[in-house]
Image (spheres, rainbow, N blue to C red):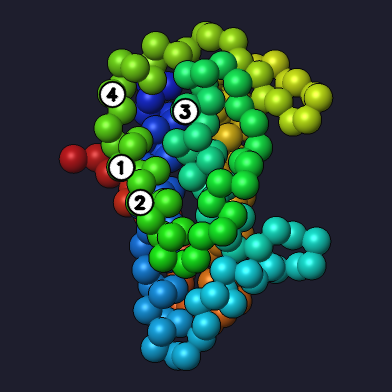
Amino acid sequence: MSISLYDCTVRSFLQVLGSVSGFLERGRAHCEDNGIDLAGVVETRIFDDMLPFRFQLVSVAHHSLGAIEGARAGVFRPPGGSGMDLDYTGLQGLVTDAKAALEALSPDEVNALEGKDMVFEIGPRQMPFTVEGFLLSFSTPNLHFHATTAYDILRSKGVPLGKRDYMGQMRLKA
């Protein structure tokens, strides 16, 4: 059995986005039930030199849908100012929109990107990749890092989440 680029990326990205959507909803409910200010959650950092919850979720969208868009364009850059002013509800919408856009992609259009060259640009620095190298060795680990950090921030606020909340919908054998 072979596995396609679509299976390794989009299907996995959708699993992460689904779990993030779920734990964001549980986080909202917990905060509202316990008088925890959602605006404060959005600004929460695990440590002073880390970026806040808001950035983590912008990065979740950026390293899933944004990664596929970058692969199409042949260039990927860090997220700009877009989304950096979103509140909790806006961040939930960002994740939902990224999930919907990924669901609209066909396997053929993603698989057609395989073998193409692309670069990651950060300031004047350029890092060359093939699309599959970029998606599998750069964006996928980044997606998990930022999703985990958002999860951990909610846990630090007392949101009752467990590993199953992070895992999302697994692809079980039928």
For the point 53% across and 9% down, the residue is: 116
Q: Quadrant of the N terminus?
A: top left
Q: Which residue is mark 1?
A: 100
| C-alpha span from label 2 to label 1 | 6 Å
Q: Which residue is mark 4?
A: 106
Give x and y (percent) for residue 146.
59, 52
Q: Are marks 2 and 1 in contact (CB under 8 Å)?
A: yes
| C-alpha span from label 3 to label 2 | 16 Å
Disc 1 secondary structure class: helix
Q: Is residue 143 left or right of residue 34?
A: right
For the point 52% across and 83% down, the residue is: 37
- Mark 3 is on which residue type? Ile
Q: Could you say which quadrant of the image residue 25 lies in?
A: bottom left
For the point 47% across and 19% down, the residue is: 72
- Mark 1 is on which residue type? Ala
- Mark 2 is on which residue type? Thr
Q: Which residue is mark 3?
A: 68
Badge 1: residue crowd in 10 Å (few <14, some 14–19, many ≥20) = some
Question: Is 35 situated above or below 12?
Answer: below
Q: Is residue 118 left or right of residue 99?
A: right
Give x and y (percent) for residue 76.
61, 27
Q: Quadrant of the C terminus?
A: top left
| C-alpha span from label 1 to label 3 | 13 Å
Q: Which residue is mark 2?
A: 96
Pointer 4 or 2: first along the chain: 2
Question: Is 147 situated above or below 139?
Answer: below
Badge 3: residue crowd in 10 Å (few <14, some 14–19, many ≥20) = many
- Mark 4 is on which residue type? Ser
